[in-house]
Amino acid sequence: MALSPEIIEKINNSFKAQSMMRTMGAELSQLDTGLVTLTSAIPESCKQQHGFGHAALTFGLGDSAAGYAALSVMPVEAEVLTSEMKINLLAPATGDRIEARGRVVKPGRRLVIVQSDVFAITDDQEVHIAIMTGTMVPIMPK
């Protein structure tokens, strides 16, 4: 099912309003029903002491990709908040950029189950650096 223009506009506006995503240099690179991809270079300001992308960068991108995937299956007036998110870090974040691919596993009125796979990418080589599973809570206006 194609996303409505209202949902597309809502997600784009919401993403632009996230100062953390600007800090991380993130871009919204794919937006489909139940699927969202965010990409970012690995900014110097987001590296840890060994020169790898910090886990907070990996987590932030994965969480937001999953959250926007959840938002894409909600009514236009809804918002979502992360209730819980588990991350398994699989490899260091090294490369030219990081890509987080969020998807909805099970939509619901009260809970939306989501996952994100996060990859470090150099040229055309991808390294799977994290898998995340979580729960988003739909928030409806009063």
Image (cartoon, grey):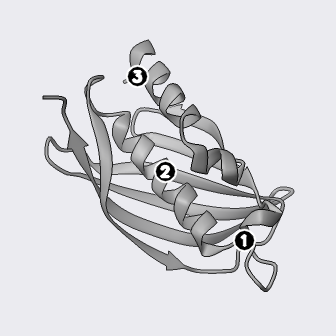
Q: Quadrant of the C terminus?
A: top left
Vertical relation: 69 (above or below) 142: below
Res. 115 image quadrant: bottom left
Total numbered badges shown on the rendered structure:
3
Q: Which residue is mark 2?
A: 64
Residue closest to the eye, 54 or 131: 54
Relative to residue 124, is residue 16 drawn left or right?
left
Vertical relation: 19 (above or below) 141: below
Q: Which residue is mark 3?
A: 7
Question: Dots 3 and 2: beta carbons under 8 Å?
Answer: no
Position in image of residue 4 (x %, y %): 40, 16
Q: In whole angstroms, how far apart are the C-alphas of marks 3 and 1?
A: 31 Å
As drawn, the label of residue 53 is 1
Vertical relation: 67 (above or below) 90: above
Res. 114 image quadrant: bottom left
Position in image of residue 19 (x %, y %): 59, 44
Q: Earlier in the sequence, mark 3 or mark 2?
A: 3
Relative to residue 135, is residue 99 drawn left or right?
right
- Asked whether residue 24 appears in the rendered view, the answer is yes
Q: Kindly give the residue lying farthest to the top in the view shown.
A: 5
Q: Mark 1 belongs to which amino acid?
A: Gly
Residue closest to the eye, 54 or 20: 20
